[in-house]
Image (tube, helix red, strand yellow):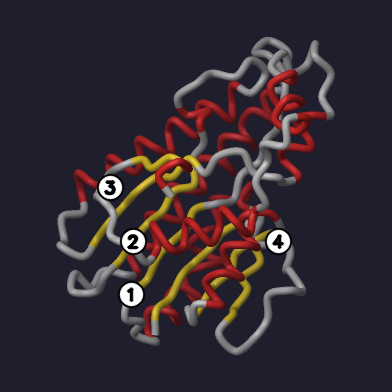
Amino acid sequence: MDAAIVTGVSRGLGAALAAALLERGFTVLGIGRSGNPALTGARYVFARLDLADAGRVDEVLAQPFGALADSRPASVCLLNNAATAGPVGTLGTLAAADVATSLVVNLAAVVALTNLFCRVFDDKAQPRRIINVSSGAAQTALAGESCYCVAKAGMEMLTRALAAEQQAPGFRAISVRPGIIDTDMQAFARSQPRDVLPSVDMFLEFHSQGRLVPPQVVAAKIVEKLVVGNVEHGRTYSYQEL
């Protein structure tokens, strides 16, 4: 039995990843603010947690992580997928509380989840993998999305830090920039006025040119290439490589 932990399973890419993994016979622990009625079955467990409460990661998730470890899966993979697009706006216009929440959800919670994963799944003989769902925004600054860009860049550094620290032969940490996905996050970006999100035209063009890819298509590629396939420790993969 292979196992996977997926964050952000209530919708979008997270829901699609969980479904694709279940279809391949994985046992899946889904984490999110709310459940998804499409994700069911004996091999699916849901843990409710708002990642804005990153300080509660150990308190809420130590038990389900431990139960999964006790089931002795042949391999285990953590997919850090959950993210928030807000707050939108150029620096100088944002509320400090919104900045803090964004960085907590998009980065601090990811580090906390990774820390718990490394602590609970500490068998060096067990194949273990962490996949951080990043973005092209980790490399290309988007005006009005500074918090999101900063967090995604930090996530890719987390991948490299794991590669430096985790030297067991079966441990792999990678990032993936999954391309332009047809999700609520894209719709949210398209709805913003130009004075709030100066880069909004880019998101409008993605939609008008038909470049958005269904989350199910992206999820299937990630599972096939990055969860199941051979990967290079510490590397960031682009959608074009999937």
Q: Which residue is mark 1?
A: 75
Q: Earlier in the sequence, mark 4 or mark 1?
A: 4
Labels 4 & 3 near each other (Cβ < 8 A): no
Secondary structure under tag 3 reads: helix
Residue nearest the viewer, comparing 70 with 35: 35
Q: Earlier in the sequence, mark 2 or mark 3?
A: 2
Name the kind of residue labelled 2 in the image: Arg
Q: Determine the residue positioned at 70% across, 33% down.
A: 86
Q: Determine the residue positioned at 80% across, 11% down.
A: 195
Mark pair 4, 2: CA separation? 22 Å
Q: Which residue is mark 4?
A: 10
Q: Which residue is mark 3?
A: 162
Labels 3 & 1 near each other (Cβ < 8 A): no
Labels 2 & 3 near each other (Cβ < 8 A): no
Residue nearest the viewer, comparing 36 with 183: 183
Name the image quarter holding residue 166: bottom left
Secondary structure under tag 1 reads: strand
Q: Earlier in the sequence, mark 2 or mark 1?
A: 1
Mark pair 4, 1: CA separation? 24 Å
Q: Position of residue 220 (x, y in %)?
A: 53, 62
Secondary structure under tag 4 reads: loop
Label 4 crowding class (10 Å Cα cut-off): few <14, some 14-19, many 20+?
many
Labels 2 & 1 near each other (Cβ < 8 A): yes
